[in-house]
Image: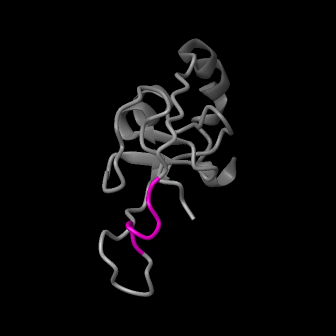
Amino acid sequence: MLELRPTCEHCNKPLPPQSTDARICSYECTFCAECAEKLLHNVCPNCGGGFEPRPIRPSKNWKDNNWLQHDPPSEVIRHRPVNTALHQQFSASLRYIPPAER
């Protein structure tokens, strides 16, 4: 189950559970859309994978207790600003390879 991390790992922007601005990689590294696109160039600085919009967990109990109240978001903030110079070197070749082919 997704943790629904509360903030962007780089800029620490709040990303509440209903945010359509959250982007995650397959390891659930979490960044805001602006950082993922403009700073990271769709290359996760932690694994090299790409980003996708984070799904929104239902805010109501539509079925079988699968909802935000039963499975609340994480409160653990992982603020780890990216070293942009190092990331530019790391992502230089990866950003031109589609995430599905990395």
Q: Work out which quarter of the rendered image holds the N terminus and state it.
A: bottom right
Where does residue 68 sit, x and y in percent of width and height? 39, 66
Determine the image quadrant of residue 13.
top left
Determine the image quadrant of residue 49.
top right
Nearer the observer, 69 or 79: 69
**Residue located 31% across and 56% down the image:** 18
Nearer the observer, 60 or 92: 60
Determine the image quadrant of residue 87.
top right
Where does residue 71 sit, x and y in percent of width and height? 47, 66
Task: Name above or below for residue 24 compared with residue 80.
Answer: below
Left or right for 21, reference 37: left
**Residue located 52% across and 22% down the image:** 81
Task: Name above or below for residue 53 compared with residue 6.
Answer: below
Q: Which residues are magenta?
A: 67-73
Look at the image and say whether residue 25 sits in the magenta stretch. no
Left or right for 33, reference 84: left
Look at the image and say whether residue 71 sits in the magenta stretch. yes
Left or right for 50, reference 93: left
Where does residue 7 sit, x and y in percent of width and height? 42, 38
Where does residue 63 sit, x and y in percent of width and height? 39, 87
**Residue located 48% across and 27% down the image:** 10
Q: Residue furthest bottom?
A: 63
Task: Name above or below for residue 96 compared with residue 66.
Answer: above
The colour scheme used here is one colour
